[in-house]
Image: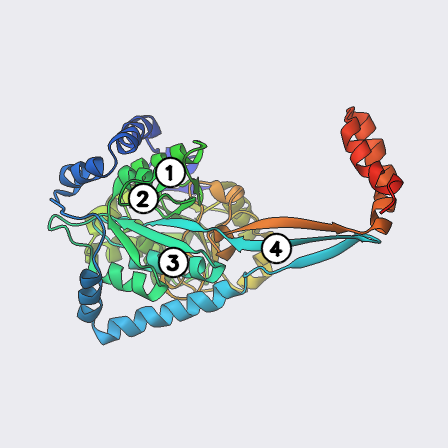
Amino acid sequence: MKKLYFGDAKNLCRRSGVNFARSFSTAQAIIADVKDRGDSALFDYAKKFDYADLQMLEVSDEEIAKATKSIPDETKKAFESAASNIEKFHSLKLLGRQSVETMKGVKCFVESRGIEKIGIYIPGGTAPLPSTVLMLGIPAKIAGCKDVIMCTPPNSKGEVPNIILFAAQICGIKRIFKIGGAQAIAAMAYGTKSVPKVYKIFGPGNSYVTAAKMLVSIDPEGAGIDMPAGPSEVLVIADRYARPEFVASDLLSQAEHGEDSQAVLVCTDDNNAEMIIGEVNRQIKTLKRKEIAMKAIKNSFALIVEDIEEALEFANKYAPEHLILNVENPNEYISKIINAGSVFLGQYSCESAGDYASGTNHTLPTYGYSKAYSGVSVSSFQKSITFQEITKQGAKALCPIVSQMARQEGLDAHEKAMEIRLTTNL
């Protein structure tokens, strides 16, 4: 394959590195401190990292009401429309009872239950993410989660952005805490005087947040997590029919997320690849976050391939978070897509639509994890419980099978538990 790079060639084979060695040690110290000192540690970290001198960790009802009033009607309508689309799509995956009779008299079924206590983390930084509140809060509500709390860092005045609070209201999230970073993950995983302990934590974050999530997930006293993650990414497959300005805008919409984001172009046409790169260089100058986007583009590359099949072969190895097929007749290739978080088909299906309002979820596996993980859905907020109901006829059919298998494992109590039901008169 002929290779043409935005940035350094080494990025073709691996993503930009995450220094988890440093992140893990720092996160581990913060977790231990929060476990030991609880709220006191959280107030101290708010001063240290957010420059906020907080009097209370929890957002008050007055703050939420004031925030809701401050949002313009046009913005409210946009978020409410997005929420409606997200709810429509995610309701498709609401699991009820599924039943099968495996043998005569042996009925097995599975029912789903919402995870009772859920924690949602929404990062702050240079770009607050109210859309992520919708992406996590709405599926949690549909799944029937009983208690949902949210943590997000405050600004130096001790305030949470109004739009974050409004988005939480749309989702029915009542309890919101002004806590950021690894300390927020620790607070939700173990609980403090102010913050209730949860059973599973969702949401993106920096390497320290990711490290903290991974650490609490392997602690029996901690909490489950949605998925491991690395920097965000998009891979665009473009053919000679793809409009360069469309493709360039998709690459840059990913690049503006962060310096460690990666935007990958896989193109079947050398001339079009050159035009797309030219458009990237032109459009990047107009962005408000151009300095961030420029650094991300240095971590990115363009790859010229022979045909769409070869492009898909590379995409399945790369396993991108977002995969865009800006090619002629994209639906012909759906069955060949094996590893991807979310897929966008055709020239009008931009990543921005999925990030905000088409209805699918934007909390997706990154860093190659789409080879083994799915994006967040209603089922992420549920757990399944299996049931079996066996009649005497079913026990009679199962007995010789169970007895024979139990003997092979030397577990005679298992064998007797089955046989006693057939030898005892009721």
Q: Quadrant of residue 5?
A: top left
User: Which of pointers 4 and 1 indicates the residue nearer the eye?
Assistant: 4
- Which percent across, then down, holds residue 242? 43, 61
SS for dot 3? helix
Cβ atoms under marks 2 and 1 closer than 8 Å: yes
Up-down: is 364 above or below 360?
A: above
Cβ atoms under marks 4 and 1 closer than 8 Å: no
Up-down: is 231 above or below 95?
A: above
At horizontal 25% and vertical 60% (from top left) the residue drawn is: 165
Crowding at mark 1 (Cα within 10 Å: few <14, some 14-19, many 20+) = many
- The amino acid pointed to by label 2 is Gly
- Which percent across, then down, holds residue 354? 41, 61
Q: Give the CA separation, mark 4 to mark 1.
A: 28 Å
At horizontal 53% and vertical 45% (from top left) the residue drawn is: 316
Which residue lies most toward the front here? Answer: 426
Q: Which residue is mark 1?
A: 213
Q: Which mark is residue 137?
A: 3
Q: Which residue is mark 2?
A: 205
SS for dot 2? loop
Q: Which mark is residue 344?
A: none
